[in-house]
Image: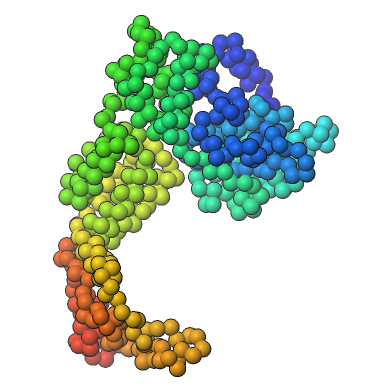
Amino acid sequence: MEPDLFTAAAEERQEKDPGSSPLAVRMRPRSLDEVVGQQHLLKPGAPLRRLVGEGAGGPAGPASVLLWGPPGTGKTTLAYVVSQATQKRFVELSAITAGVKEVRAVIEGARRAAGGYGKETVLFLDEIHRFSKAQQDSLLPAVENRWVTLIAATTENPYFSVISPLLSRSLLLTLEPLTDDDIRGLLHRAVAAERGLGGAVTLPEESEEHLLRIAGGDARRALTALEAAAGAALAQGEAEVSLPTLEAAVDRAAVAYDRDGDQHYDVASALIKSVRGSDVDAALHYLARMIEAGEDPRFIARRLMISASEDIGLADSTALQTAVAAAQAVAMIGFPEAALTLAHATVALALAPKSNAVTKAIGAAMDDVRAGKAGPVPAHLRDGHYKGAEKLGHAQGYVYPHDVPGAIAAQQYAPDALGGRRYYEPTRYGAEARYAEVVERVRERLAGRGQDGPGRGDARD
């Protein structure tokens, strides 16, 4: 790293007085072996190990990498470890404050260091998704010619937020959310380590479990809450971080919720049943319990998407669009803002008209298929594009719907064994009432009855 005078002074002060730094900073790993989680990226010969010089000899130098993962999974930590362990020149930029001018200055400095001292440069660029296309373009020559080895971090899907040329010149490394065991090990280390709390307090199991719920897979959040609670306990002359002290310190009640046990499924079930029952207030209550307990927002969004098709269907076809949009937004922004998005979708789905006609329709169709009620595809519907199909009678007699008035041709579509079988029986709720009227007219036309005269239009009008 190339610190300025102010950065150097701050680092010197932190060395003399470790307590002046946040616990999350003090507990940063000092080597790759201390990193919590992400073991799939830390195997011998892996790109991150090559960046710090392990097995980096020979003509195949370490490649630039893109680190993609949710907040608190260790993207910045990994870059910090590389900066401490590598013998290379290390420069850090943030896409929030840096622009093309700063990038070009780093690249020019890297070329001078390589030419004058034979020293390679590692550039860590945090939040690369905030860079515009032009700003990302400015990195290409340096990455392609290996004037710098780039470590870029992003919380957003790089296939949407990073330009293709940069993706193709880098290795994409996906960071997985930390498990409860990962966070638990980090908490134990922070309580005991001299650079952490130095054993000044103990952490009972119930407080530990609450910290895991608060963390939601975010190591930084866990350590920040632990530091606040430990400070509150010591201020009260307590040697133990009790649950009441922890709750008061972080202002979050210990919700009875086990993300791997019955409560996980019970509360999730109650949320969906409240949405199905149109009780918006109960639905919001269960949503809040899941959020406060640190539930994965993507799990909640998936359940809402399922509910939109299972319980609402065509009574309000915008419900699925709302749920899908919420899931996409949640994946991009994460907590705490994702709580607003999930609440938006929950209210919309709870108050939408309900219909399970689509659910029953596909269920009945699948039951028939499983019972062996299938039969061959009618000959006029079979593929007629290959040589010899005509001799087999395939596609013969097929009526192209667009060639007839109303674009509905009276012909058989279902196999013989299922002639006349009806699966979709629409309700009269919400927008599905229109489908109920349309489906009867369409079925009449398909059967050759109820033909409209010339110019009378579509049966769906």
State left or right for residue 43 relative to residue 382.
right
Name of the residue lying farthest toward the top: 237
Q: Position of residue 112 (x, y in %)?
A: 80, 35
Please identify the quadrant where the C terminus is shown.
Answer: bottom left
The answer to which image quadrant residue 106 occupies is top right
Q: Give 68 or 49, whichever is nearer the viewer.
A: 49
- The count of marks equals 0
State left or right for residue 388 relative to residue 290.
right
Q: Position of residue 182 (x, y in %)?
A: 46, 30
Q: In the rendered view, would you say 120 is above or below 384? A: above
Q: In the rendered view, would you say 260 is above or below 383? A: above
Quick check: can you spot residue 248? no
Name of the residue lying farthest toward the front: 372
Please name the residue shown 48% across and 40% down the image: 176
Please name the residue shown 26% across and 91% down the image: 454
Q: In the rendered view, would you say 414 is above or below 235? A: below
Q: Give 311 or 113, whichever is nearer the viewer.
A: 311
Name of the residue lying farthest toward the bottom: 391
State left or right for residue 16 relative to residue 272.
right
What coloring was used for the rendering? rainbow
Q: Position of residue 315 (x, y in %)?
A: 22, 62
Quick check: can you spot residue 201? yes
Please identify the quadrant where the N terminus is shown.
Answer: top right
State left or right for residue 304 relative to residue 5.
left
Please name the residue shown 44% across and 45% down the image: 332
Q: Position of residue 361 (x, y in %)?
A: 23, 67
Please name the residue shown 38% across and 28% down the image: 212
Q: In the rendered view, would you say 436 is above or below 114? A: below
The answer to which image quadrant residue 379 occupies is bottom left
